[in-house]
Each structure stands twice: as structure tokens, then as C-alpha cells.
Image: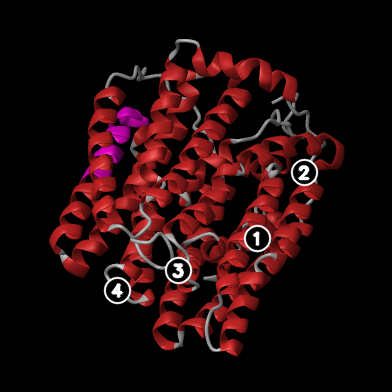
Amino acid sequence: MIPALFPTPKSDPELAPFRSGLVFAFFNALSWQIGIGTPMVLFAEQLGATPFQVGLAYSFVFVLTPVQILSTALLPKYGFKAVMLGGWRTRSFFLAVPAALAAAALALGGERPWMVHAMVWSVFFFCFFRSIGAASGVSWFYAILPAQIRGRYFASDQFASAVASVGTLLACAALFALLPVYWALLTQYLIALGGSTISYFSLKQLPDGDRPTAISLATVVRDTPRHLFTRSTFSTYVWLAVACAVVATPIPPFAAYFLKVGARLSTAQIMVFEVARYSGVMVAAWVIRRRIDETGARPFFLLALGLYAVVGLYWWFFLRNGVGGIPGLFFSYFLLGLGAATWAIANLNYLPKIIAQESRTLAVSIHGAVTALIGGLSPVLWGMLLKGEGGAGRSLDVGMFQWFFVSVVVAAVILSSLVARLPEEKGHPVDPIVIGNAILRPFRAMTYLVSLVEPVPRKKDEGR
């Protein structure tokens, strides 16, 4: 199993020099699954967070995308490695805050009002420094990996991250089932902190790439309005993708929040549903991507929207009379993960078909930034609308939550009719955009498209 996850000179001599990158992918999954995933939502709820506070904390990873854009200006001066290490090192300190809060709750015999505010701020700073490090991201690996092994590396990267992610979710479910809630949360955040520390030291072992050339911010400011508002297939698709993000992004945090405060399910049960959602993501990642070259992206956009509509319809019935119960919820989570990853994969395949090669770097970054930023504001706005009676504490307006899922269904139907009109040439295959294991985080995948760094060829690849 270990050689399959982490290649050795004997099992794969070409990948072995980059083994530490795969170790990074594995242990980094522990930190993001807990630090900005459903365990974070459940921790915030346990501390007494309102829907607005949950939506705000969940949105930080999206709305801080401008920090990622600005941080690309650091790359030509400091290089890929220094920027990513700086971001990853500093973000780790803010994983210690929730661990300290869990320990404080144990010592004090329960939560205190100030704790939820400290929790939200810790997520903000974690995401802030993560955004700085992410400015390097996939571009660094492109700069150091030989062209002939990139596909194999990113496939291994995805596999290592998937194994770690599923293991983390199952471990969280088991901890919630076996331990008192704050002991479980303390243990989880210590795991996340350990994963973040190991991932940092794994990154340190990788070589730096050549200093890149970044697109100037003046060029970004000048050309962004043209890309977004000039009538074109690209601009049409960007706004359809934004609409889809606005619809889909709030579903995971508020579904988990409702199941805890409204349906009164246990945290362990909710984490099992997260395993189902992640199973849907993995099915899409390993099945759909093999068929999309034959069928084109558009049918998969329509499939994703259809799945969102089914999920929205099911939840509307569930909120009214509990139809389907636990098995229905499990299946709806699976469909949600399947739909999110299907859209993300289709997006990576479709974008290169509608963007000229000379403007690809900037256009893809614009698409990722606008989609992530506007889509990330959606949980904040819905959090304000979903506040329960009195607007404070652990409560959620179930009637408004039903209207939320009505809006999901209606938007999915309208978007389907518009997406069906998108032009797509078949018979002219293009290389899809590669974002490594980020495809396994489909709701955050747009943030990984943001890079104002022009591709840097390896010296050994030049002249090929």
C-alpha cells in the first residue's frame, strides 16, 4: 500500500524524486478536510454559531481569492517555494486556535460566547495565509515536473489525497461516535495540525522552480472588463458558471448545520453523510473524466445541473415531511458530490475550447476568481436569510430553508436551458486544465484556477 501511495526508486524511479510532493498531498488533506470542511462547520455550531457565522466562515476560502491574485506579484521576487512555504507555515498556527478552544471548553465545562468569534477569526486567518501560499500552487509543480511524468504524478497526487480524505472523514465520524464532542474536536484539530506540519516539511524537500513571469496587475485591471463583458462564448459561460456557484456553494454547510440543529442528528451521522458526498466526488473524478473527451463537456454540465435539481427537490420534500430518512439523506449527499465534481471536470475540459492560447492564463484566472468570489458570497447572504427566530444562537428558519432549495431547483432548470445553447466543437480534442488533487474539492476548485503566472518550461523540456 505504501509504495502505491508514495513511489520508491524501485517501484517508480521517475516519480521517486518527487515523493515528498505526494506526501504533502496526503497529509495536507488532513488539514483542509478538518480546518475548512464539515468538522469546522460542526465545531462552529457546537460553539453556538448562527447560520450567518457559519456561512461567513465557510465563505472565507472563496472570498479571499483576491489575496491569492495579489500574492502572485511575490512569485517573481521570492520564487514558488518561498511563497508557498510562507503561506503554509503561517496558516498552521491558526489550526492551533480551534484546538485551544476545544481544550478551553473542556476546562471551563462548556463553551463561552467569545469562543465562536475566535473560531470564525481563526478560519479567516487560516484561509488568508492559505490564499498566499496557493498563489504558487500547481504552477510550482508544473515548473519542476518533467513533462513526461506530469500526468502520472497528478494521478498519484489525486489518489494519495483521496485515500487521506476518506480516512480523515471516517476517523472524524468514529471520534464523534466514541468520544464526548469536545474531546473529539480536540483530537481532530490535533490531527489537522499534525497533518499541516508534516505537509509543510514535505514541501521543504522539493526543489524550487525557475522564477516565473507574472502578468502585471495593470494588465489584469485593463483586460478583465473586456473578457467579462464583451459578447463572447467565454463571457457567457463565465456568468453561467457564476450562477451555478451561487446556487451550489451554500448547500454543504447549511445542510450539515440543519441536520445538527434542526433534524438533531448526531455529528457522527453527519460525517458519514460527508463520506457519501466524497464518494460521489471520487466516482466522478475516476469515471466521468474518461468519457468526457468522447462526449464533450456540455452533456456533463447538464448532468450536473440535473443532479443539483434532484438534490434540491429531495431536500424540499425532506424538510416538509422527512421523506427518505437516513438512506435518502445518504443518497442525496452522494448525488451532491457527484454533481459538484461533474461540473468541475466539465469546466476544466470546456475552458480550453473557448479561450485563445495567448490569453489562456489570464482568462482562466478571471473565470476562477469571479466564480469563486461571487459564489463564495452566497453562503454569507443565505446565512443572513436563514437566521432562526430571534436571530441568535443555534437555530435555522426551516421555511426559508425550503425556499432555498426551491431556488436551487428553479435555477438548475433555467441554467440547463441556457447551458444547452453553449457552442462546443467536437472532434478537436484539447488538453484539459490540470489542478491536481483540487478536483477532489469541487466546490473550491475554482480557486485553484487563479494564477497570473505564465507557464515556465523546464530546461529539459525546452526544444522538444
Instruction: Give yes or no for contact between labels 4 and 1 (Cβ–Cβ under 8 Å).
Output: no
Lower position in the chain sequence, tag 3 or tag 4: 3
Residue sitting at the far front: 390
- Residues at marks 3 and 4, CA–CA distance in whole angstroms: 12 Å
Taking 455 as reference, is 282 left or right?
left
Q: Is residue 47 above or below residue 90?
A: below
| Residue bearing the label numbered 1 | 24
Q: In the image, which residues are magenta?
A: 293-309
Residue 261 in magenta stretch: no
- Residues at marks 4 and 1, CA–CA distance in whole angstroms: 36 Å
- Residues at marks 4 and 2, CA–CA distance in whole angstroms: 46 Å
Pinpoint residue 364: horizontal percent, then vertical percent: 56, 28
Lower position in the chain sequence, tag 4 or tag 2: 2
Lower position in the chain sequence, tag 4 or tag 1: 1
Pinpoint residue 208: horizontal percent, then vertical percent: 80, 46
Pinpoint residue 194: horizontal percent, then vertical percent: 66, 73
Lower position in the chain sequence, tag 3 or tag 2: 3
Q: Is residue 440 above or below residue 223?
A: below
Q: Nearer the viewer, residue 184 or 347?
A: 184
Pinpoint residue 157: horizontal percent, then vertical percent: 56, 54
Instruction: Give yes or no for contact between labels 1 and 3 (Cβ–Cβ under 8 Å).
Output: no
| Residue bearing the label numbered 4 | 264
Instruction: Give yes or no for contact between labels 3 and 2 (Cβ–Cβ under 8 Å).
Output: no
Q: Nearer the viewer, residue 443 or 100?
A: 100
